[in-house]
């Protein structure tokens, strides 16, 4: 019985499912869509004033599960709106019904939609940050390094001020697949296939030559592959001349992987202050 429970627990962690004990709440969000598919949807919480900075969150879940309803983390919306920022959490189409390329395009299209509604929503289109966790960290890093997704959405590289990647995976897809272990092998193959050229194209580390998003913040916990993937992406961005900060946070393995998402925005969590300081620098408030 215990062996059967372990995979279930791991899948829950990868999906970022919040715990019932999380008590922080925010006002009900405004629901909107950015495409025709039911999963092309956004929850939006307004900030202060008529030109508030905006934090956009992209959930994780192995590219095939998770949603803005169960994988955003309970602390983020109340924390960032409490700072005066607007906050949005997006859904995107999931593997196998969609490809990772389509998922990245969904992220770019969601950014474009929110920018197009800037006046109505009271946001500053010049002060937008993309944040993602796990598979969502991979997707925000991908759209922040491969400008084809922004270009297709009629966006320039500075359409966002920066990218925050929380304990991501598969920044270098071929290396991740070689070192990811048996449990994740099917997930990676389902997402990225077996074509080396496609795997390279979907690797932010291998697409880090400029142009890129203007700034990056990479946070990771104590996971061997996650640490190595984050360090390699940081090195590639620096080589390209793109500003990047990288920090290791407390927490180990899959439990730490869940914690970084669940507790981001909690004042007692070590990562919250790091992100807040980085946002203040980029947003100017």
Image (cartoon, helix red, strand yellow):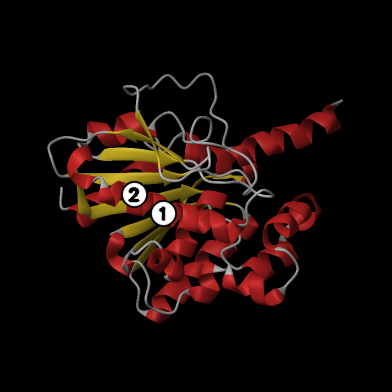
Mark 2 Cα-neighbour bin, 10 Å: few <14, some 14–19, many ≥20:
some
Q: Residue furthest left?
A: 49
Q: Quadrant of residue 29?
A: top left
Q: Quadrant of residue 180?
A: bottom right
79 with respect to 149 (left or right): left
Write the residue at 52% across / 35% down.
Answer: 71
Q: Is residue 84 above or below residue 247?
A: above
Q: Which mark is residue 113?
A: 2
Q: Position of residue 64 (x, y in %)?
A: 65, 45
Q: Quadrant of residue 60?
A: top right
Q: Position of residue 285 (x, y in %)?
A: 15, 47
Which secondary structure lies at badge 1?
A: helix
Q: Is residue 59 above or below residue 185?
A: above
Write the residue at 61% across / 74% down.
Answer: 200
Q: Are marks 2 and 1 in contact (CB under 8 Å)?
A: yes
Q: Which mark is residue 218?
A: none
Please name the residue that numbered disc 1 is placed on. Answer: 109
Q: Position of residue 59 (x, y in %)?
A: 50, 43
Report if residue 283 is visible in the image: yes
């Amino acid at each position: 019985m215990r062996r059967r429970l372990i995979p279930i627990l791991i899948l829950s962690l990868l999906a970022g499912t919040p715990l019932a004990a999380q008590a922080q709440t925010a006002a009900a969000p405004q629901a909107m869509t950015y495409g025709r598919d039911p999963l092309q949807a956004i929850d939006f919480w307004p900030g202060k004033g008529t030109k508030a900075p905006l934090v956009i969150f992209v959930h994780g879940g192995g590219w095939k599960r998770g949603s803005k309803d169960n994988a955003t983390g309970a602390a983020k919306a109340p924390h960032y709106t409490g700072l005066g920022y607007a906050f949005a959490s997006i859904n995107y189409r999931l593997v196998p019904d969609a490809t990772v390329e389509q998922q990245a395009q969904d992220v770019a299209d969601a950014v474009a939609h929110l920018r197009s509604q800037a006046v109505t929503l009271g946001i500053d289109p010049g002060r937008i940050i993309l944040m993602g966790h796990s598979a969502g960290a991979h997707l925000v890093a991908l759209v922040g390094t491969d400008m084809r997704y922004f270009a297709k959405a009629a966006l320039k590289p500075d359409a966002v001020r920066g990218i925050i990647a929380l304990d991501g995976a598969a920044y270098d897809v071929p290396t991740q697949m070689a070192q990811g272990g048996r449990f994740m092998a099917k997930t990676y193959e389902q997402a990225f296939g077996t074509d080396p050229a496609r795997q390279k194209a979907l690797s932010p580390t291998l697409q880090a030559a400029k142009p890129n998003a203007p700034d990056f913040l990479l946070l990771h916990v104590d996971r061997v592959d996650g640490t190595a993937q984050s360090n390699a992406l940081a090195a590639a961005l620096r080589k390209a001349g793109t500003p990047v900060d990288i920090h290791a946070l407390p927490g180990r393995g899959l439990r730490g992987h869940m914690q970084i998402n669940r507790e981001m925005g909690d004042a007692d969590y070590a990562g919250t202050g790091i992100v807040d300081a980085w946002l203040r620098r980029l947003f100017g408030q």
